[in-house]
Amino acid sequence: MYQNSGGAAIEEKLVKALKARGIQTTTGLNLRDARAQDGIITCNGVNMESLSTFLSYNAGEQSQFQVYLYQVLSQSIPTINDFNAFALAEDKFRTSHLLNQHGIHTADYRLCHKHDMDGLKQALHEFGGKLVYKPTEGWGGVGIVKIDSEQALNMLTPFLTRTDLRYFYVERFINYDHTDFRVDVVDGQVVGCYGRKAPKDDWKTNITSGGSVFVRELNDEVAELAIKATAILGLDIAGVDIIYDRDFERYVVLEVNTIPAFATPDQEALGINFNARKLEAMVGLIEKRAYGQLAKKQSKVA
């Protein structure tokens, strides 16, 4: 569990609630400190594959080493989220592609190979002269660039062609009111919702990009959309970002986050008070996975 912005207190509550249900926990199992050899993954003296389930909840520390071990660990024990679902949701192109195949609207997108500059220019034209370049992986709005003219695209082209990227992912820039819904889903149920607003003279709502949060009422259409998107991606826990497209008059899933943060103490003071509901749902999910794994082991022994 992340330790900043109230995360340490959330972890303490989570451990206490699980203990009350008879579930023993071990904290501090950061895969950054893990070691794998001879068929065993250990972290701080713990055999990771002896655990009944594993929850990693720290978006800011997902190095390639950690993700690689997470993938291997997910093959042996239940992980929340499952690695395959985690990897899918972390990839913006694969997420958008799959959601569209299941009838969920996302921003219009295009994936172009590195040297397909004509394809990028065609996308700019087809998307009404405005598009957004996004890294297919990453969070917090890092690396996202708005392109609103062919001149701007031409200026960006030399940079793009010099990078090690094999392809470019771009989306139509959506005409919206610069606010979004962040809907938290745990084990198939909505546990919280709040709004985010882009700062003045900007269009990105991410908190790390200067966005602010506000209390926002959830309607049935947005709730159902968030639950459906989470289920399609196979996630146990998700934070679904949804905006309203004013041109097409419909809600659009902009992104699905695999490690959505709890409300910070400052946000709770504003009236964003879903932490207790989210915590209870996560406790229930962990309990279900842990006892399910225990029953599986006992049946194998029998």
Image (cartoon, rainbow, N blue to C red):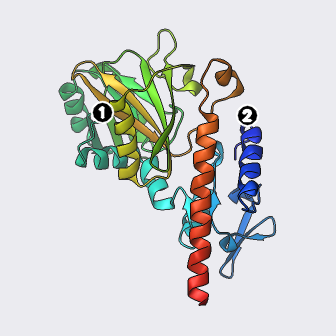
What residue appears at the point 39 percent right and 24 percent down from the top-left corner?
A: 146
Vertical arrangement, residue 281 with respect to residue 109, above or below: below
Q: Is 116 positioned to the left or the right of 60 in the image?
A: left
What residue appears at the point 24 percent right and 21 percent down from the top-left corner?
A: 129
What residue appears at the point 29 percent right and 19 percent down from the top-left corner?
A: 149
> Would you say residue 20 is visible in this rendering?
yes
Tell me if mark 1 has few (under 14), some (14-19) or many (20+) residues whose alpha carbon lies within 10 angstroms of its own.
many
Instruction: Give the CA separation, mark 2 to mark 1.
Output: 33 Å
What residue appears at the point 26 percent right and 34 percent down from the top-left corner?
A: 108
Residue found farthest to the top: 200
User: Mark 2 is on which residue type?
Assistant: Gly
Viewer-side residue, 229 vs 199: 229
Which numbered dot is residue 37?
none
Which numbered dot is residue 107?
1
Residue found farthest to the front: 21
Residue that label 2 marks: 6
Quadrant hosting residue 292: bottom right
User: Residue 167: horizontal and vertical position, in percent?
Assistant: 35, 46
User: Mark 1 is on which residue type?
Assistant: Ala
Tell me if mark 2 has few (under 14), some (14-19) or many (20+) residues whose alpha carbon lies within 10 angstroms of its own.
some
Secondary structure, mark 2, is loop
Vertical arrangement, residue 4 with respect to residue 199, above or below: below
User: Residue 16: horizontal and vertical position, in percent?
Assistant: 77, 50
In the rendered image, the quadrant that contains the C terminus is: bottom right
Q: Is 113 positioned to the left or the right of 125 in the image?
A: right
User: Residue 197: horizontal and vertical position, in percent?
Assistant: 49, 17
> Which mark is in front, 2 or 1?
2
Viewer-side residue, 62 vs 252: 252
